[in-house]
Image (cartoon, coloured by chain):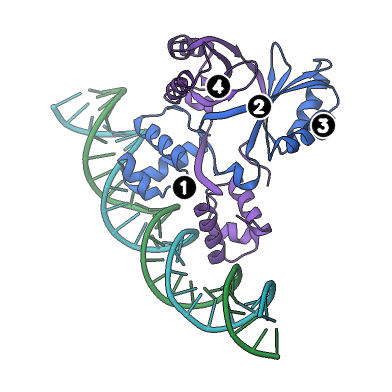
Chain colours: A purple, B blue, C green, D cyan
Amino acid sequence: MKLDEIDKRILRALQRDGRMANTDLANEVGLSPSPCLRRVKLLEEAGVIDRYVAVLNPASIGKGLTFFTRIWLKTQDEDTIEHFATEVAKLPQVMECYLMLGDCDAMVRVVAADIDDYRRFQSEHLSRIKGVQNVKTDVPSWTIKYTSELPI
Amino acid sequence: MKLDEIDKRILRALQRDGRMANTDLANEVGLSPSPCLRRVKLLEEAGVIDRYVAVLNPASIGKGLTFFTRIWLKTQDEDTIEHFATEVAKLPQVMECYLMLGDCDAMVRVVAADIDDYRRFQSEHLSRIKGVQNVKTDVPSWTIKYTSELPI
DNA sequence: GCATCTTCGCAATCAAATTGCGGACAGGCT
DNA sequence: AGCCTGTCCGCAATTTGATTGCGAAGATGC
């Protein structure tokens, strides 16, 4: 989809505040409400805007820590990987999971309340997935940047 | 903040659809619109709901690839780290940046259009930050899971 | 220069957000 | 038990914003 400058302004604004009133958005991007809303609908239909979400404060719901876990599988055949993918998708603590080429086979980002909560998750869920041979956890000591705003 | 079952239902719903109409939300969680809205406002004021955002499709704006870059700094003193943090915050391609304990000093998640776009970013921006000694890039071959919904 | 397509803004209509208020329910005290 | 108090609900009125239809302005191409 071809995006002009106004579309980009709309996307930037909605990335900052996805619940902004259309009238305010229109004002910000320099349109009147109706063509502005029309553009937003088109961006949604075209899939440029995938969805709208509320971003929660992880600490306030007892998920204040992030862990990165690198995973090595016993084998890299399709069945093993697919089974792993299916099981990982079921674990709500896993926010992201990537298959990697190179050193490890997969990397996941996990949220947990504390170290013990994470350890429990690792031993009771992650390590029990069939095909998982070894896991190694990296703990970020500080988050410098965390954004959901894509550059546009 | 103490969250009861209805609050949790609200948070789950708004994580799925942050732009849901309050009337629909009220209906889903089993309240009438006014107390439902009151709870949402309280959750916002308490910071449980941090903000609302539109989630864009990275591919549709030419940022379809994700890269993980591990970074080693020349020294780990506070000045070096703070300078690094300041500079990284300015780079819009960087979605996340964590300081790590252990192997590497920092890890960033970067979005780019393609490999060349990433290489340019790495050589022209990341590697030029003062204090950066070495970087190593990991490329996910597939994203199995990617969610913004915290378990609650 | 004219026809056509696109996208705008205005105005009317409809739907949802917001607010104020009375009532139900729960917990604590006498 | 009976009463007082604090909390949270739902209803209804009001305000605000979303949505739609339509005519006009500007851009594009023949």
Q: CA distance from mark 3 to mark 4?
A: 27 Å
Tell which tag, 1 or 2, sits nearer the viewer: 2
N-terminal label among 3 and 1 = 1
Estimate the x, y position of residue A85 in percent, counting from the top left.
47, 24
Read off the residue under disc 2.
Answer: B139
Read off the residue under disc 3.
Answer: B123
Tell which tag, 2 or 4, sits nearer the viewer: 2
SS under mark 3 = helix
Circle 1: residue type: Arg
Read off the residue under disc 1.
Answer: B19
Q: Can marks 4 and 1 be said to lie on one chain?
A: no
Q: CA distance from mark 3 to mark 1?
A: 40 Å
Read off the residue under disc 4.
Answer: A108
N-terminal label among 1 and 2 = 1
* Res. B119 image quadrant: top right
Instruction: Answer above or below: position of B96 versus C15.
Output: above
Estimate the x, y position of residue D20 in percent, counting from the top left.
42, 69
Circle 4: residue type: Val
Q: CA distance from mark 4 to mark 1?
A: 28 Å
